[in-house]
Amino acid sequence: MFDTLKKFKIMGSRTLKTGISVFLTALICGFFNLPIIFAVITAIVTIEHTAADSIKKAAVRFPASAIGALLATTFYGLFGKGALTFALVAMATIAVCHKLKLDDGILVATITATAMIPDFQDHHIVSFFMRLGTTSIGIIISTFVNFFLLPPNYSPMIYKNINGLYNHAGLLVKRIINEVTAESKEKTRGIHRSYRQLTAHLEKTFQLSRYQREEWKYHRHSKEEMVAFQLSQRKLGAFQQIAYHLGNIQYVQTKAADFTESEKGLLHSLSDEYARVLHDPTHTIREEQFQMVDQLDDVFWKWKEDHVEKETGYRHHLPPQTILIYEMLCFHDVLEELQNLSEKQRHIVEKCYVTQEN
């Protein structure tokens, strides 16, 4: 049933695990005739992305919840059931948990503490242990469910994201080259926005990679899965270099008059070829690209020799034109590394990345 729900994307694994945690928590509390609401709220907010995070944060949330319950009992005994009590309990719980470096437990502790106030019994100590017990049930159940049930596998999403990153970079490099060699600079803001989206997507993919590493500390995985994951990390490392060069190119201050028509044609043709390699999951470079790179290398040294000294006599060793050409040459070097990497792991590339592309 779980596989069917996941296949049709009715709900994700984390949503399913939250529902199961709430059901089991309510069932246990009901069986022992304990207040359900505190335990259920705790179970909802303690489902994490990975089993590792659940275990780590459970060890923080329990003492934080104990602190929150203790503070709620204390302030209720001093001020009764009033607005001031709610405010003081919330502030004190947050402040104490933060001071004790229990930040991952602040939300659960504050909810537990404030939710206790309207339902206090005459025996404050009994209320304290009862609320702490029900909160602990929610934490324990959600941790066990997160650990044993539907362990997450972020690898397919990582592979899909990597394909998306390279496709995005392919489109962006063409836009940037068209912009930096154009007469008008009207679209610069759109390029900057696209680049920020690219880097944000890259950070998200690195986060997913961290989740996958943490998950494998507690669940078994095959050697093939590990090799494929290591390849994904190398591709992400290469993409960081590509993002760096794209970032440099987009800020180069050039004008259309800075290049001859043949130089602009060469830059445009090369950016088209770069985009093709980036869109190709195997990152295969054609001979035409090597020839164009050789031509661009000649242009670079010509620019360096002919234009290093400005009319003012100030020697500027890297004028904007040479920076642009230099970054394009560096871009090619990264693509060569990608091609070599993909050739060595071609069977994994075809299984993980070509499949995702299709």
Image: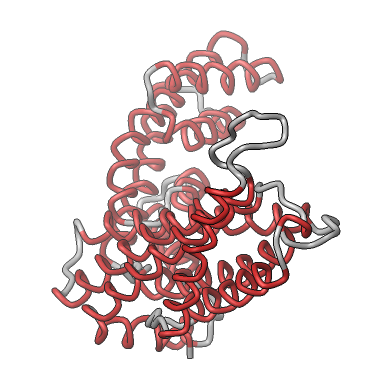
Q: Is residue 335 above or below residue 89?
A: below
**Residue 85 on image: x %, y %:** 63, 17
Q: Nearer the viewer, residue 277 or 225?
A: 277
> Is 305 situated left or right of 187 in this image?
left
What residue appears at the point 51 percent right and 48 percent down from the top-left corner?
41
**Residue 127 on image: x %, y %:** 44, 29
What residue appears at the point 41 percent right and 53 percent down from the top-left corner?
48
Residue 103 lies in quadrant: top left
Inspect this view and state whether residue 247 appears. no
**Residue 254 on image: x %, y %:** 72, 51
Seen as rendered, the residue at the extreme top is: 78
Inspect this view and state whether residue 49 appears. yes
Q: Is residue 197 above or below residue 42?
A: below
What residue appears at the point 47 percent right and 84 percent down from the top-left corner?
288
Q: Nearer the viewer, residue 220 or 17?
A: 220
Give the quadrant of the N terminus. Answer: bottom left
Residue 332 lies in quadrant: bottom left
What residue appears at the point 42 percent right and 35 percent down from the top-left corner?
104
Q: Nearer the viewer, residue 203 or 328?
A: 328
The number of numbered badges drawn on the structure is 0
Q: Is residue 261 above or below residue 242?
A: below
**Residue 333 on image: x %, y %:** 38, 63
